[in-house]
Image (cartoon, rainbow, N blue to C red):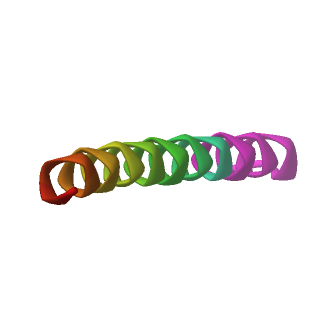
């Protein structure tokens, strides 16, 4: 396995992690907003 391929996989994994983190945060924020609206 060469360094170029390893770097590409690392970058791909990092990007995927970033997308998953953003999606999870977005979902959590929407759920909290709905909960806040329900309580108010």
**Residue 25 figure quarter:** bottom left
Is residue 5 part of the magenta span, yes or no?
yes
Left or right of residue 25: residue 6: right
Task: Identify the residue at image location x=44%, y=41%.
Answer: 23
Residue 28 in the magenta stretch? The answer is no
Q: What count of labels does the image hold?
A: 0
Q: Is residue 9 above or below residue 35?
A: above
Identify which residue, 27 or 4, lies in the foreground: 27
Relative depth, front residue between 40 and 4:
40
Q: Residue furthest front?
A: 40
- In the image, the segment drawn in magenta is 1-13
> What's the residue at 27%, 56% (across, down)?
36
Q: Residue at x 23, y 44 (%)?
A: 34
> What's the magenta bit mostly, secondary-structure-wise?
helix
Q: In the image shown, does 10 or 31 lie closer to the viewer?
A: 31
Image location (x, y in percent) of residue 9 = 65, 44
């Amino acid at each position: 396995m060469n360094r170029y391929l390893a770097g590409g996989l690392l970058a791909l994994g990092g990007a995927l992690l970033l997308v998953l983190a953003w999606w999870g945060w977005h979902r959590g924020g929407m759920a909290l907003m709905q909960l806040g609206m329900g309580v108010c």
